[in-house]
Image (cartoon, rainbow, N blue to C red):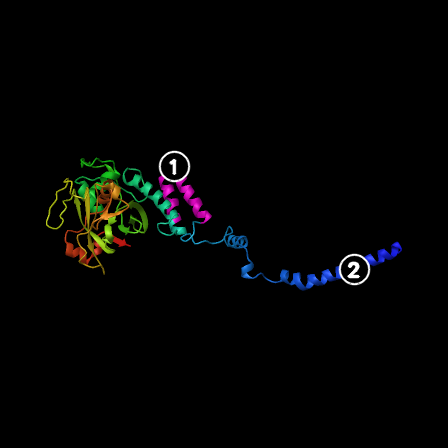
């Protein structure tokens, strides 16, 4: 057979094979490429890519569910930097913006971080004469006393002493002396689940304290007001009277008694916020139903909270005159 005949046969066979291959492609492969993949055909890697596409920069993410936005994180970083640099008011302002503008879920990590910064700032401010926007300057007049000034401003002698570096045993003031006074609009939220007591000044978070609560869910939830305050409290369990200082007295250094209000069961009496000689129980359910605080924390809270009206029934009828306490699960 001549070589050119072989070449012609080879080209014919090659052409036939190409035609068969093209037909197979059009019938079997091309349709699969054109259609959308079924859900079962999506790989785990492809699912990850799709989720990441929804989280591209600029997408709105609920900070209370996921995390803070990049702007919120920058605010927290600036707040920490300002705090480290001693710029207290600026640090607090940035942390407050995180809570106000980005609204992280309460007790989430971003919320706790912002609250921690605010708490540190306010701890320094209420225990020193550092000026702050909420502190009012008052010039002592003839005939003034710390008690009279405290009543006039709806605060306490102890709070004035703390904010003006006046020793607790010292009460002497003189005309012309300048005092810083903070008349807080205080309210309290206790979260049993998070073992936390949150102190508010008006709408602003002021400070967060760690607390202990009652074992076996003995701390009642509801609304209350503080109806009495006691220094070095005597503990009176049923049929007993245990003086302050006795090892069996569990109340610590201060007592803030709670009175139920609103729809809360009026029989829920005898509960309070108090100190403890067992600080290791803070963050646990160990009390007989009261809210426990470290002694140094309850001392501070006690000094800030003004004294309630003396008449208990009048306070029950008009609870606005007392500091509101909400205990939630």
Question: Where are the magenta residues, as a range?
Answer: 69-98
**What kind of element bears circle 1?**
helix
Return the x and y of residue 287 as percentages of the image width and height.
Answer: 22, 48
Q: Are marks 1 and 2 in contact (CB under 8 Å)?
A: no
Q: Secondary structure at mark 2?
A: helix
| In the image: residue 80, left or right of residue 192 | right
Spot occupied by residue 299 in the image (x, y as percentages of width and height): 22, 42
10 Å crowding of disc 1: few (<14), some (14-19), many (20+): few
Q: Which residue is mark 1?
A: 84
Work out which residue is located at the far front of the displayed protein and give it: 1
Q: Nearer the viewer, residue 66 or 102?
A: 66
Q: Residue at x 71, y 63 (%)?
A: 23
Across the whole image, how many numbered discs are drawn on residues? Answer: 2
From the image, give the main secondary structure of the stretch colored magenta: helix
Residue 293 to residue 35: above or below: above
Against 329, is 74 above or below?
A: above
Residue at position x 26%, y 53% from top?
327
Residue 158: quarter of image? top left
In this view, the residue farthest toward the bottom is 27
Identify the residue under disc 2.
15
Tell me the crowding category of disc 2: few under 14, some 14 to 19, or many 20 or more residues within 10 angstroms, Cα based: few
Checking the image for residue 5, the label placed there is none
Structural distance between the alpha carbons of marks 1 and 2: 80 Å
The x, y position of residue 79, in whole percent, is: 40, 42
- Residue 77, magenta (yes or no): yes
Q: Where in the figure is residue 100, as x and y percent of width and height?
A: 38, 51
Is residue 293 covered in magenta? no
Lateral position of residue 172 relative to residue 81, left or right: left
**Comes first in the chain, label 1 or label 2:** 2
In the rendered structure, the answer to whether residue 2 lies left or right of residue 235 reads: right
């Amino acid at each position: 057979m001549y070589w050119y005949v072989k070449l012609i046969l080879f080209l014919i066979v090659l052409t036939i094979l190409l035609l068969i291959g093209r037909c197979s492609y059009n019938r079997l492969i091309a349709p699969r490429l054109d259609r959308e993949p079924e859900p079962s055909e999506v790989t785990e890697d492809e699912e990850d890519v799709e989720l990441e596409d929804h989280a591209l920069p600029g997408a709105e993410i609920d900070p209370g569910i996921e995390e803070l936005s990049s702007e919120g994180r920058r605010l927290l970083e600036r707040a920490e930097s300002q705090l480290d640099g001693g710029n207290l008011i600026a640090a607090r302002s940035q942390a407050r913006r995180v809570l106000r503008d980005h609204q992280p879920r309460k007790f989430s990590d971003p919320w706790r971080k912002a609250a921690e910064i605010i708490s540190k700032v306010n701890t320094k401010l209420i225990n020193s004469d550092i000026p702050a926007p909420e502190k009012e300057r008052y010039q002592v007049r003839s005939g003034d006393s710390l008690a009279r000034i405290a009543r006039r401003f709806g605060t306490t002698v102890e709070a004035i002493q703390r904010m003006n570096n006046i020793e607790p045993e010292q009460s002497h003031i003189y005309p012309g002396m300048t005092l810083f006074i903070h008349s807080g609009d205080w309210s309290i939220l206790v979260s049993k689940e998070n073992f936390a007591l949150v102190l508010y000044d008006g709408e602003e978070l002021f400070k967060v304290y760690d607390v202990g609560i009652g074992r076996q869910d003995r701390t009642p939830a509801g609304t209350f007001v503080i109806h009495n305050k006691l220094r070095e409290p005597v503990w009176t369990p049923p049929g007993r009277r245990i003086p302050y200082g006795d090892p069996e007295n569990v109340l610590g250094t201060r007592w803030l008694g709670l009175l139920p209000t609103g729809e809360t069961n009026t029989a829920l009496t005898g509960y309070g916020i108090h100190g403890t000689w067992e600080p290791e129980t803070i963050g646990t359910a160990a009390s007989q139903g009261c809210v426990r605080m470290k002694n140094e924390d309850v001392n501070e809270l006690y000094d800030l909270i003004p004294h309630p009206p003396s008449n208990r029934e009048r306070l029950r009828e008009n609870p606005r005159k007392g500091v509101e306490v909400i205990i939630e699960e």
